[in-house]
Image (cartoon, rainbow, N blue to C red):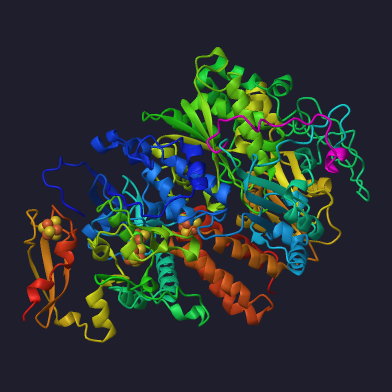
Amino acid sequence: MTTVPLAPPRRLLEFTLDDTPVRVPEGATILDACRAAGKDVPTLCHGDTLTPKNACRVCVVEVEGARTLAPACSRLAEPGMVVRTDTERTRHSRKVVLELLASSVDLSTTPRAAEWIKGYGAEPDRFGPEARRLGEEPRVDNDLYVRDYDKCILCYKCVDACGDQWQNSFAISVTGRGFDARIAVEHDGPLTESACVYCGNCIEVCPTGALSFKREFDMRADGSWDEEAQTETTTVCAYCGVGCNLTLHVQDNEIVKVTSPHDNPVTHGNLCIKGRFGFQHVQNRV
Amino acid sequence: MDLRFGDSKPTDDERRAVDAVLGPPESAWEGADDRSAEDLRWARGGREARERRDLLLPGLHALNDRVGWISEGGLDYLCRRLTVPPAEAYGVATFYAMFAVRPRPAQVLHVCTDLTCAARGSAAVTAGLEAEGVAFEPSPCLGLCERAPAALLVRAGVERDEGQAHDPAPPGPGSSLLGALGGQAPTAARPLNSAVPGGTTRGGGPTRLARVIAPATVGALAGVARNPEAAEAEAPAVMAVPQAGHAARPVRPGGRVVPTLPQTPSGGTPTALRDDCPQPHALQLLRRVGVVDPGSVDDYRAHGGYAALRRAFALGPAGVIREVTESGLVGRGGAAFPTGRKWQATASQPDAPHYVVCNADESEPGTFKDRVVMEGDPYALVEAMTVAGYAVGAHRGYLYIRGEYPRAYERLTHAIDEARARGLLGDDILGSGFAFDIEMRRGAGAYICGEETALFNSIEGYRGEPRSKPPFPVEKGLFGKPTAANNVETLVNVLPILTQGAEAFRATETKLFCVSGNVDRPGVYELPFGATLDELLDLAGRPDTLRAVLLGGAAGGFVRPDELDIPLTFEGTRAAGTTLGSGVVLVLDESVDLPRILLRIAEFFRDESCGQCVPCRVGTVRQEEALHRIKDRTGEAAAGDIALLREVGQALRDASICGLGQTAWNAVESAIDRLGVYK
Ligand code: SF4
Ligand code: SF4
Ligand code: SF4
Ligand code: FES
């Protein structure tokens, strides 16, 4: 959760979380309460800088008296609520959701996916070899970033980041419907013919690696991407007076990608094209 | 926002289609071609246009109606006019089945291949069309199930209004229903205001022509495909009401005579009996269908119309809500939520404005009751919406009607226009000082838009994806404001509540049922609460070899022939482990291949899932795949996949965002558990 300095004090409300009374500020979600209590609830479509679309449903919890399970990431805590995060029902739904996802898209670059699949005992293979998959080819149509929608879980984060939540460029949207729904730019054309301004804020929020730096994509393809060997250095962008924080990811003394700290109260992890992609001049060592 | 609209230009036709909805652009900032000196000096537009984003859907319809599909140039022009980002508009256009974003022929023949039509031979029709070389598109339920198999022909760019410009006359002295059925010029035929401007998608040159062909035969479809103008007149709405009283209606050849039901408690005057269908009680909601002229507000008033609104004005908004609450009326859309409570909750919200939304997007396979009410008694809905608006303090109502109902759309557009002309809508209704008006919105082929929050998004010009609740619509509904959303059947119930009083209404409360499939007299039936499924089947003429009844539609459940004593009430069906849902009663006899029906249900949900949440988007695909694998298997050979279905089904039910995903496994589960279909 983003901290807002000097906000007026919020009232606390009390509810029961896994049989323990907890107190959270008004407006907190169940997920906030879980995290404050040190519980590990899996999330995919929830982003720390965005209002979640609660579309992935891996964070579901049981709220006493409710017919269905509730998404912890967006359901606000209410006084007197009785919530259980680790019941047979929640574990079942999470397991099946992970199976459904892993059987339809490529989760190989999704952080923690493998760990959850193991932890919840999910078996994505049991839908058989014929189970329908997205089967999308990576779209490489510019030098800055690649859209590999075979890895897309339709979490809506990139759409929200590009649209009214951050960038206000509205270059990407969900198109089609049902299993055929995809992220696309207008008229499903190449990125270069769209309203995209290459701020890369969509890459910043993508939880699966479906959107990635061209450099990262190429290095993964030739097997030279090695996250373990990378160092991260946070510095200040020198292009303009805004002074955004940049985190340089460096492998073998080369900047391979640039991110931005999400807890920065000015940028919340967002950058513009220069800060995000304009780093080649640093390493032009002729 | 920093919008980019691309370089593609609209054709003159596309530009005119959009301008017919939005009016001509006022400046280059708004999309005009020429820059005036002023345009160079001031930047204008933006906010105002953006606030009319709810015209995006009508704009897409206008393009699609005139050209047959939505081109880049057309879409970009519409976006420029409304300052909507093209990527978002593209996402909206691709959400709906009736729109195309790639070139296609101006004429599309939609042939229903859904449950009822499949049970009544749509496969033979589509095979025949293929053999004849007639192009068609298989379609989900068209809401014409009583006349299955059904088809809808849509042709873009026709110099006339959509729908049949005139209707067969209502049956009355001297008019012959048979004549109307046979396509002879009906005696009192009257053009239905094809020239009245008003509704946003009307007027302004070529639009679409839509023809319903039901029952559909290969010959009739081939003929209509070649010459749509020559299509036979559609059967009048009353033909879907077997209980309606017409002395003029001949006995159906071979129609079975059914024993009369014991008299049930009733109020009002009983309608005359139709010869082949016993009339056990007075019709309440359907009593004007076939009796009143759907094109005349005077005739509506002559048949008791607008008495309820007068009573409402006498009672005051709080009095209306009290009466509706005391009547015990619950929503007929499936959720059975108390209507009075919903209205009270909306009325008491401090946020303003309030809205009333009529959900006429009836797309559940096997449902057509709202269509029949809207076609046969359109003013009743206009009046009921006005009452609702008065009660909850709304000055604007939205009527969202499914795109596949050309005649109901036409009649309601006309009814709204006429009511407005007569001061029954507008600034000062009946001199009461109350202002209320209704805007129509036409859906574009998306079952999910029947979910109320998806419907709000659709009206607002967004993708028809459900929102998560809470917050509930009474608090944050249409345009984020307090909204009372009710379906057609719920709303028209308000009229007898007000005219008879809550107490009398309780004694005579009825429910509409859409009976289709293998019965002698398919149609809409109105029964007092408490009648059993058995009694309903007596009225409709049951098949000799009853295999199962699908109750509540694709989201409902199957019941066995030995369970027909289920009382048709919300509690009764719930106690029996099934649901009344939207009132679907789909009757299947032994000739029906159940596994194939289940596959169709699964295919329907997979196709209609909005795709927003994972359990539903992928789960419905996995459900369909498993049903495919076991369609010819039983016992041990099916057991593994049935276990898989149960697991996926449980997650669908527990973790989906909306009712579509939550109910997508209901019918299949009941077929497995109650009918033992794979035993
Ligand atoms: S591309 Fe990434 S951020 Fe966008 S919807 Fe797909 S997974 Fe989410
Ligand atoms: S990232 Fe862009 S906006 Fe931020 S400091 Fe650098 S140039 Fe300026
Ligand atoms: S349950 Fe299905 S239809 Fe409903 S929101 Fe989820 S994906 Fe959309
Ligand atoms: S993290 Fe809550 S639904 Fe995705």
What type of secondary structure mainly makes up the magenta span? loop
Q: Position of residue B245 (x, y in %)?
A: 84, 33
Query: In the image, B476: left or right of B647?
Result: left
B215 vs B285, nearest the viewer: B215
The residue nearer to you, when weighing B481 against B296, is: B296
Residue B542 lies left or right of residue A67; in this view the side is right
In the displayed structure image, the side of residue A175 where residue B425 appears, left or right: right
Q: Magenta stretch containing residue B413, yes or no?
A: no
- Residue that protrudes farthest toward the bottom in the picture: A223
Instruction: Tell me the residue at 66%/34% (across/down).
Output: B411
Looking at the picture, tell me which residue is in the foreground, B155 or A222.
B155
Return the residue nearer the eye: A124 or B70: B70
Q: Which residues are magenta?
A: B178-202
Q: Is residue A197 above or below residue A137?
A: above
B82 is higher (above) or lower (below) than A93: above
Residue at 31% of width from left, 60% of height from top? A158
Q: Is any atom of residue B468 visible in this view?
A: no
